[in-house]
Image (cartoon, rainbow, N blue to C red):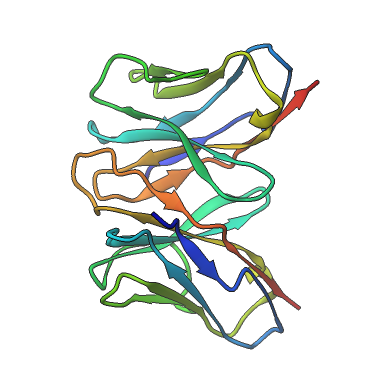
Amino acid sequence: KAGVTQTPRYLIKTRGQQVTLSCSPISGHRSVSWYQQTPGQGLQFLFEYFSETQRNKGNFPGRFSGRQFSNSRSEMNVSTLELGDSALYLCASSLLSGGVRANEQFFGPGTRLTVL
Amino acid sequence: AQTVTQSQPEMSVQEAETVTLSCTYDTSESDYYLFWYKQPPSRQMILVIRQEAYKQQNATENRFSVNFQKAAKSFSLKISDSQLGDAAMYFCAYRSGVNQFYFGTGTSLTVIP
């Protein structure tokens, strides 16, 4: 099976612009979660989508949004970029959402966003 | 809210030796899952080991084992016979019943030849 893929791998934007990142989960996985990774902060949960519905949301401003398509592919959008948005954005897919099983998340390679 | 704390930002170990990475968490839930993820310099995060909170037996995966102390809310990772390929950032993660993951800030492990 192909792993989680993210595009683009690198992105440079300027303040005030908007950006869209894409994530394709492992085939058959219906849950996609997004994380922001910065040095010293670790991974901060952004949101999770399952069957095209947002299931969970982290503590990020409304400038961060996402969606999921019927094929489980997900996009994340950040509007009005700020310097502090520079980070590695990781996407992770899992088979299920919730439940009592140890629902392992499989991570993509990430998109490195630099805001100038 | 659940929090995950990794108090060791950096650790080092001699090749072939054993190292233990610490992780504590805070939760009011009784049913949850704990994970250790490894992120090598290439940045692809991979799962090392998982532990179900309802299981008393500590999980083991080859050279990797955990010491899970539920009452103390502690979940440490022991790496035996350390290899150069073990050098990476290690993240402890907690998964709640609603599939939300909480990660620690990571421990950077250096393996000294």
Q: Is residue B13 above or below residue A36?
A: above
Q: Which x, y percent locates residue A39?
A: 68, 51
Tally the numbered discs.
0
Direction from residue A75 to residue A101 in the image, left or right: left
Residue at position x 64%, y 87% in the image: A16
Q: Residue shown at 25%/71% (left/top)?
A: A53
Percent x, y of residue A47:
39, 64
Q: For this view, does B84 lie left or right of residue A88?
A: right
Front in this rendered view, residue B111 or B67: B111
User: Residue farthest to the left?
Assistant: A99
Report if residue A91 is visible in the image. Answer: yes
Answer with left or right where residue A82 lies relative to residue A53.
right
Image quadrant holding the N terminus of chain A, namely bottom left
Residue positioned most to the right: B113
User: Against B93, is A44 above or below?
Assistant: below
Q: Residue furthest bottom?
A: A17
User: Considering depth in this image, is A4 or A53 the residue closer to the camera?
Assistant: A4
Residue B25 location, quadrant: top left
Image height of B86 relative to B97, above or below = above
Foreground residue, B34 or B17? B17
For the point 42% across and 68% down, which residue is it?
A24
Q: Is residue A40 above or below residue B107?
A: below
The spot of residue B81 in percent (x, y) is: 62, 13
Inspect this view and state whether residue A58 appears. Answer: no
Quarter placement of the C terminus of chain A: bottom right
